[in-house]
Image: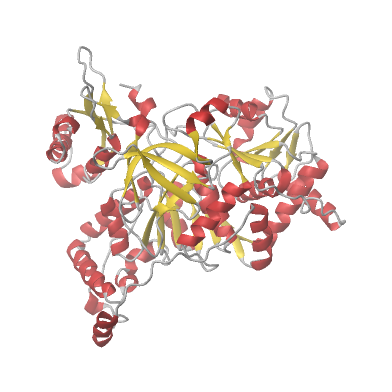
Amino acid sequence: MRILKDFKVPDFKFPKFKMKGLSEIDEVNVDYDKVKKAEENQNKKDKKNYEGTNFSTIKEIFINSSKEYADKTFLLEKFNPKDDWTEITYNQFKNEVIGFGTALTRKLNLKDSKIVIIGENTHHWYVSYMTMLCGVGVAVPVDKELPENEIENVIRRAKASAVIFSTKKADVIKKVSENLPDVKYFIQMNSSNELNGRFIGLDYLIEEGKALVKGGDNSFMNIEIDSEEFKVLIFTSGTTSNAKGVMLCNRNLAQNVNAATAYVKLTPEDRLMSILPLHHTYESSIGFLLPYAVGCSISVCQGLKHIVSDLKETKPTALLTVPLLVENLYRKINANIKKSKKDGLVNSMIHLTNALKAVGVDIKRKVFNEIYENLGGRIRIIVSAAAPIDAKIGKWIEDIGILFLQGYGLTETAPIAALTPDFDTKVGSAGKAVICAELKIDNPNENGEGEVLIKSKTLMLGYYEDEEATKEAIFEENGERWFHSGDVGYMDDEGFLYITGRSKNVIVTQNGKNIYPEEIELLLGKYNEIKECMVYGKEVEGEKELTITARVIPNYEEIEEKYGKDLDEDKIYKIIWDKIKEVNKGLTSYKAIKKLEIKHDDFVKTTTMKIKRFEEIKKQ
């Protein structure tokens, strides 16, 4: 929904790597008798799903986790960069949710109302969202990066009765409030202010609600949840069209949790770091509701520039992220290894540890300890979703001993439709259909590629106040609802899904051939000289055929290191064009890139860092 014009990928800072050889690592003792025995007796483990959870509503999850993990830490957050991390237990969180819910329903009479939540990832965002899902009304998470006029428009479109906002958004909300007379209350996070006009503090409401509960008011917890009832309204950040309002119910969100727990084993010892914006279903469902359901803790990243220090201080075991961040992490670590002249040693250690792991001896964490320490020391899972990623990067992550998982879905599937099982990984794929879903390829071509169709218990109720768009997106077959994803892909014989493009991005040649830009972009992305790129069909006056064009942001740091300093534009152009020619050699002629455009500013992006193609193309 929102473009991040000023988004900057963080410049990860890592110290020079020393990287010891196997013989120098005292604590690594390889028992070769054990290796031989493992090799002789090794039987491939059955690839069985975990038992998983079986929740029907988020309130059921809330009640269960509040009891099971009461004294455990749920959230870690720095409310001031100079302060220590504040730890909030499941019990504290429970009391705040119940207090807030009681105040919203009993004091402000907002039961069954639509309430906007807007702000950065913070403790009160989690409280607000859970409170809504447990019985207040319909939650409307909104992108904090929206410009003022769009914030106003979304609040109006949602017919919101209240807006919960962070202190950083206070000035904007006060401005737009003047044009929103139908909004009854504006509730400020981290504020204890009593009601002043239509403005009131969230902390004040929590305390008022707690007082009611202490006096015997159990009305909020007595609210019964209909698992099929419309409870969340999310305006998509679609990269190709105007935002649609996606209507979700408790069943959609609970089934996400059930599906993920069948494929990935998380325990109360795990900690996730919240990096992506919570208004996006990927983060709010898989980054919040899933860990909450199984007793994990979550550390809230202070911002992209703080990722490395936050990793070291909070020591998460799992990262939920997007390809752009994974790619940059990979490049920075490997650039430092190369500068340390340890790349040869690391490659040798990867081959050796892979061979040992194949026969049941895993010493990767000890061998690559230095890399782990720079990521906090406990990382065991990295999940990438929202866009395809170069399989080479996923393979390297697994080579150093970290599980690399991929997920696939859309806001309309709340969001997970496919996920890599942690017991059956296949780097490069987008995973398998989750247990509550079925995928099929519509009208596949000679390569087995076609539009991905999804049937799932996580599938949305429909688009808000847009029956026509709902009918276009969802069709019935034998009494079952199927969703047109708009994504193009294929499935292998083991049921793993591979996404090759977006049907709305497809470039169609004059003779009817389809070119999917994402496929070519992945090939270009393998070259370190290219920081980011976008491939599109450029209209050229007088030409019937679109010109396949690559718009590229050069990686100036890499180019300077490889080719020298103070290079002029022509030389940089030639360096990039030489890489394009190498890619073209592996492409059929109609897919070959014919034109290069060097880009000097950042790409316009959505909040999940996907390029806003149509905004970019308009710039030509």
Quarter of the image that includes the C terminus: top left
Colour scheme shown: secondary structure
Which quadrant would residue 462 be assigned to in this image?
Answer: top right
Q: Where residue 180 sits in the image (x, y, percent)?
A: 69, 25
The one nearer the camera, 460 or 405, is: 460
Q: Where residue 439 sits in the image (x, y, percent)?
A: 42, 46
Q: Residue furthest top?
A: 542
Whether residue 192 is visible:
yes
Q: Taking 133 as reference, is 499 left or right? A: left
Residue at 35% x, 60% y: name it: 425
Q: Residue furthest bottom?
A: 33
Residue at 30% x, 40% y: name it: 449
Q: Residue furthest right?
A: 215
Q: Taking 616 as reference, is 280 left or right? A: right
Residue at 25% x, 71% y: name it: 353
Q: Where residue 30 sits in the image (x, y, percent)?
A: 27, 82
Residue at 28% x, 58% y: name it: 395
